[in-house]
Image (cartoon, grey):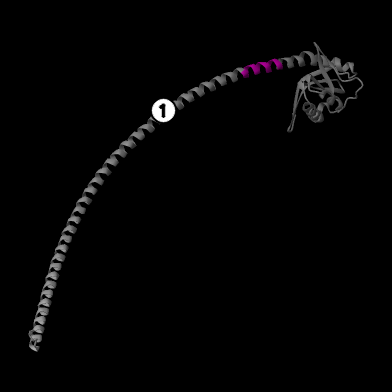
Amino acid sequence: MAQNITLDDFYALFRESERQRQETERLLRESLEASRQEFDRGLAESRAEFQRDLAESRAEFQRGLAESRAEFKQDLMEFRAEFQRGLAEFRTEIQQGLAQSRAEFDRDLAESRKEYDRRVAKSEHIAAQASEAVSNLSSRWGRFVENLVAPGVLRLFQERGILVDRTHQRMRARRENQHLEIDIFAVNHDVGVVVEVKSRLTQDHVRKFLEKLEIFKTIFTEYSQHQLYGAMAAIEIDGDVDKYAENQGLFIIQQSGDSVYISTDREFTPRTC
């Protein structure tokens, strides 16, 4: 038969349960405290290890920084040395290039001078030829004036009824600010012929000669009462300049072989001053 459970049994069972609960709480508290202590020890150790690592890292960083600075200084010194070498080489190249350029410039200058001298010599030769040509032309013109025109003027104008009896060459006079030069002047006691001689006659020459005629008597006052005619003699005549001169009332004298003649028509009326 089953044993009867009394209130005391329940009470005893309760106390045992309470005792076990308290024991469990005690063990739990002890375990928790031990865990906390272990955590604190681990934390302290971690902190200490972190401080050591940090200190080592700082020391390593300082060593690395010092090494980097030293390497940088070394690299900087090497760079400066390399730069100085490069600069010296560059200066040397510049000086060499400058010397070469100067040498080339001197050669070019020498060649230019030679070319200049050649051209000057050629120009002088051309000038000499031109001078010779001008001299020949002047001689031809001088012969034309002296040998043909001047000796023939009296005859030519006497044949035209203008009875001049003497000639003057290269007449020059100056009055106040006016200067006048006449190539040939054929004259008698009351009539004169002013002759302008050109190697090549142009229209501009005709106009300028007409201006000479206008002032002739104001400069050569001794002929102020003379009746004056104008004539132009030329070896060559441009275009229809002879017709233009005739229309202005001027005689035209041209060369024909070893003599000269008045080409102006006998019917034309000359201008008088």
Determine which residue is flagged by label 1: 100
Image position, residue 158 (x, y; %): 88, 16
Residue nearer the viewer, 65 or 83: 65
**Quarter of the rendering containing residue 225:** top right
Which quarter shows the C terminus?
top right
Counting from the top left corner in percent of width and height, residue 204 is at 77, 28
Task: Identify the main secondary structure in magenta.
Answer: helix
Q: Which of 240 and 265 lies nearest the eye of the viewer?
A: 240
**Residue 39 position within the rendered picture, expressed as x and y whole percent measured from the top left:** 15, 67
Q: How many marks?
A: 1
- The residue lying furthest to the bottom in this view is 7
Q: Is residue 133 magenta?
A: yes
Label 1 sits on what residue type?
Answer: Gln
Q: Note whether residue 114 is visible.
A: yes
Q: Is residue 53 above or below residue 175?
A: below
Residue plotted at (78% across, 25% down): 202
Judged from this view, the residue extending furthest toward the top is 258
**Mark 1 surroundings within 10 Å by alpha-carbon count, few (fewer than 14), some (14 through 19), many (20 or more):** few
Per the rendered image, the range of residues in magenta is 126-137
Which image quarter: residue 230?
top right
Q: Is residue 227 visible?
A: no
Is residue 129 covered in magenta? Answer: yes
Residue 242 appears left or right of 140: right
Q: Quadrant of the N terminus?
A: bottom left
Residue depicted at x 13% and y 74%: 28
Compared with residue 24, is residue 208 higher up or lower down, i.e. above or below?
Answer: above
Comparing 33 with 209, the one in front is: 33
163 to the left or right of 67:
right
